[in-house]
Amino acid sequence: MGRFVRLAGLGARTSASLLFSKTGESAAERAAEVLGTLRGVAAKVGQMASYVDGVVPEAQREAYEAALRKLRDQAPTSSSAEIRALVERELGASIAELFQNWEDEPIASASIGQVHRARLSDGRVVAVKVQHAGIAKAVESDLENAGMLESLVGTFVGKGVNSRGVLNEIKARFREELDYRLEARRQTEFAQIFRGDPQIFVPAVVPERSSTRVLTSEFVAGTSLDEAATLGEAERRAYAEALWRFVFKGNLVGGMFNADPHPGNYLFQPEGRIAFLDFGCVQPIHGGRLGPARALHRAAVARDEQAFAQQVRVIMETRGGLYEDLAIAYSRRCFEPLFSSPFRVTREFVRKLVLEIGEMKQVIFKKGGNFVPLPEGMVFMNRLQFGFYSVLARLDVEVDYAAVERAFMAGVAHES
């Protein structure tokens, strides 16, 4: 009840600020404070708003980004006593027995957990991610809050599309983020997909120091997206190429869809190398969907408009009519970086994509529009599309994304 009251108050104050304030500065500061303290799904909404272009009205965007960036970069932390107790309970031994050295001050904190630097007895430096105390209850409270879920559905796919399947898919993905054993398996799978790639690095998991609520990986350092965005054009281009390859080779070759393009999950290193963190929100792409997804990308790279439109019909399971036309047109705009490659993803391009999703809402209840609900597995695609493109927009560089895809798809057989 307390979480609900605080969220309701935040909504009222934020709405008033957006209506009557030119900058929204006071409401933005309050939003960061409340969402950060609440953690869980509520904090994730705030983190997404901090970097996805088009979510906050343009007049208030600067104030909200500045305030919510604090939430994105350094969420409130749990006490050292709580963290130590949880680690010892989960791993069945004292901190002194488990680690040669342990730093109580966290090096990062997010909506689900926080990260501590430690050293193993063999000298390896590791990053230990530990869940916040009570976070499972907080997430469950948010997931059972109909208003919260409607807000999330609106962010991902537009309000009015909150079918039972959509809501269940959102619940499943967020509940999975609480299972660090599952995340460890997925992190290992991604490491295998990109083994040998000189620009993509996925830290190795330390399974003997990991559990359902504790995840230990080799420690890796790097700079933030904001710092990477200040570098020279050649290095920014190398970063953008690596990001595109990580996302779409993971999807199209590995069959693994990582749906959390949070800028804090990327550590930028010299010579265009990026270390990728956090594999809690990953959705396997099953065989029946993988073929059409590959065909869709191949059509875009080949600039084959008819083949592309046909694959949109297959993937979206449309039935003709206005909704199908809008789905094809909108998907085509989303794939502009491939059709018009080389392409520069800009913040204005992303903002328009977010705003244009509103056109799809017009036919949800329109008679004869032939609206169909989103197929299973598609809910988080908008989260990836908007979030990932917003990251690329910060790098602000022209890239031949079609060439990147041709390279990693060269050895993948065409589906009949």
Image: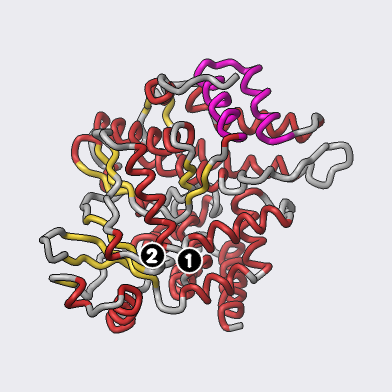
Residue topped by disc 2: 110
Q: Which residues are magenta?
A: 288-317
Question: What is the residue that sits farthest to the left in this orientation?
Answer: 123
Q: Is residue 21 left or right of residue 120?
A: right
What is the C-alpha distance between the residues marked 1 and 2? 8 Å
Image location (x, y in percent) of residue 378:
61, 44
Q: Earlier in the sequence, mark 1 or mark 2?
A: 1
Q: Are marks 1 and 2 in contact (CB under 8 Å)?
A: yes
Image location (x, y in percent) of residue 361:
73, 45
Image location (x, y in percent) of residue 293:
57, 31
Residue 142 versus residue 257: which sits nearer the camera?
A: 257
In the image, what residue type sits under mark 2?
Answer: Ala
**Which image quarter is the N terminus in?**
bottom right
The residue sitting at 18% across, 70% down in the picture is 99
Q: Which SS type dominates the magenta stretch? A: helix
The residue sitting at 75% across, 34% down in the picture is 318
Q: Is residue 414 above or below residue 129?
A: above
